[in-house]
Image (cartoon, helix red, strand yellow):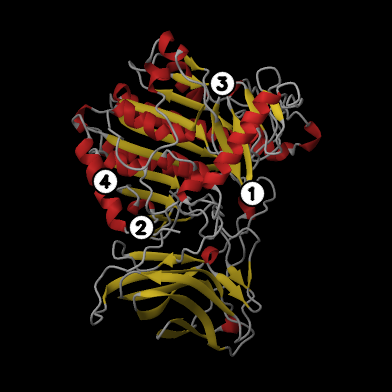
Amino acid sequence: MRRTRPLRHVILLAALALAAPSPAATRPNVVIVLTDDQGWGDLGLHGNRNLSTPAIDSLGRDGASFDFFYVSPVCSPTRAELLTGRYHPRGGVHGTSAGAERLDLDETTIAEVFRAAGYATAAFGKWHNGMQHPYHPNARGFDEFYGFCSGHWGDYFSPPLEHNGRLVRGKGFVIDDFTDRAIEFVEKNREGPFFVYLPYNTPHSPMQVPDRWWRKFEKKDLPMRHREPQRENVQHTRAALAMCENIDWNVGRLLAKLDDLGIAGDTIVLFFCDNGPNGFRFNGGMKGRKGSTDEGGVRSPLLMRWPGRIPAGRRVSRIAAAIDLLPTLADLAGIDLTRGKPLDGVSLKPLLLGDGDAVAAWADRTIFSHWRGRVSARTQRYRLDHQGRLFDMLEDPGQRRDVSAAHADVASRLRDAVSAWSAELLPGLDDDTRPFVVGHPGATFTQLPARDGTPHGGIRRSNRFPNCSFFTGWQKLEDSITWDIEVPAPGRFEVELHATCPGANVGATIELAFRDSALRARMTEAWDPPLRGQENDRVPRTESYVKDFRPVKLGAIDLPRGRGTLVLRAVEIPGSGVVDVRLLMFRRLGPVPVPGADSDSDTDSSRSRD
């Protein structure tokens, strides 16, 4: 598989900046609100009487709403498609955890495009496309980042987060906190132009929401139900709807701030979701939910407001997808995208601003949905599912009748299209050998979470879902935790271990080693708080509970340049065990001179799929 050097990425950004045809000051601000596991049906705008979403609904009333807008079946692929305007396999995204969520380094992101055009850029919330620099949002075009990089988080009330790589403590309920930060950024950059990405992490589980929102739904009767009501967990639905109303309240706060600052007319605001709903609940009678490539798993709202430019109440009936958002927003902002990698998406500007003739001239297209080898294809009228069955979505929006025999030519054409798309994009997708980058020269801090490590011996994860897990069960000298890492430039680093240690285990000595470098530290203090998180759950979770882990300074280590295995093991265990481990944090103290070596790695852990 071809490797690329980071310098090409820099040259591309410079070319984009030079290609910009109009002054930045004349361009609109952009605010993107992306929610996590909120389905198409979780809006009042789409006929759901179980909840009220007036702020989000207003975006469609005052701007445009898309009848058929498509995303990926799960989180990180959709985010990659928004960021790049390209199908997620092109960027190497093939999973949601343990490194598979990372977006290849030779991909150009929407934030890089807008920053090169003079925009102040920020992201507040769930990133989910890579944690360590240069996959980190600060390395992908965002001047400001506040939130978390993992696929899900274990606690939504004042949890540990990060701000531009530095670990911090959140303030209050995370969605309120992220919105507060976005509002502060908008106020600071009111003269514009600014680009704000607000990827909320709700209603993804754990199902936590403040009392103010939960009280309304705790015992609420739900007249709108899933098409197979016996499969619905009503209490889970209630929690999800409460979380959606909290989202709506926060969107309303953001819209009000744009009004108060007098910049609403200068700002494009768009809202969409990353996949289908995370439960069996009302979704317009569609088949499928999160994780499915059927209509219910990939259809999302798309609402876009630009007062004075996008006509109020415009309904767009043509199919569109997340891959279209980068070219559309760049086109609306007057940013040239003629250079760089070819995009899969197209600009929707003619559908948003054009007249009836422009809409009538819009060519039919095929949009592909993929997850774990399953591929579905959607045209304006038909959907071919991953099993090769054909459905007439105008006559049968619930996908109940296979019409492939009656429309054999359509079925054959779409099967051929799926085969060609799969042959081009999917081979080698899971052959991911990228290491985790530690100590990149562009970052002061590098976080290595348990999520990205491998346990050995008796050590086990706290949960089968790695994203917000920790390692536990460390009892023997032969136990260890390893990370496959690459150090792009030699350096000296201070290392913190975020861990818990029962009193009986005080005195255990830990060694961290990489190639010929190692450091040892003795656990001298007890810290063994209980599991928590369940006190805020509205329904039982499937993910790991959390602990209040404490940072323990292990000391300083010199890391040579190159790839290898980072090993965390115990060399002395006087008690019954060692520690539970949440993460390692590396802080660069300075370079380590290496005779004959420069500061650039000879290899690049990105992958090119073109």
Tell me if 416 is positioned left or right of 582 in this view. right
Question: What residue is at 61 percent from the left and 40 percent from the top?
Answer: 419
Label 1 – label 4 distance at C-alpha: 44 Å
Task: List the residue tagged with mark 4.
Answer: 13
* Residue with the mark numbered 3: 45
Q: Between residues 132 and 187, which one lies in front from this camera angle? A: 132
Q: Earlier in the sequence, mark 1 or mark 3?
A: 3
Instruction: Identify the mark nearer the N-term, 2 or 4.
Output: 2
Disc 1, disc 2: CB below 8 Å? no
- The type of residue carrying mark 2 is Thr
Q: Quadrant of the N terminus?
A: bottom left
Whole-number angstrom distance, CA of label 3 to CA of label 4 = 39 Å
Q: Residue furthest top?
A: 356
The reply, left or right, for residue 577 in relation to residue 223 is left
| Residue type of the residue flagged with mark 3 | Leu
The residue at the point 28 percent across, 27 percent down is 261
Q: Position of residue 288 (x, y in %)?
A: 69, 35
In the rendered image, residue 437, in percent from the top left (x then y), is placed at 40, 66
Does residue 484 appear in this view? yes
Tell me which numbered mark, 3 or 4, is placed earlier along the sequence.
4
SS class, disc 3: helix
SS at mark 2? Answer: loop
Q: Residues within 10 Å of mark 1 (few under 14, many from 20)?
A: some
CB under 8 Å between callouts 2 and 3? no
Residue hosting label 1:
537
Image position, residue 7 (x, y; %): 27, 56
Please rate how many residues cluster around mark 2, counting C-alpha atoms within 10 Å: few if below 14, some from 14 to 19, many from 20.
some
Query: Given the image, on which type of amino acid does mark 4 rest?
Result: Leu
Q: Are marks 1 and 4 in contact (CB under 8 Å)?
A: no
Question: Which label's residue is closer to the chain start, 1 or 2?
Answer: 2
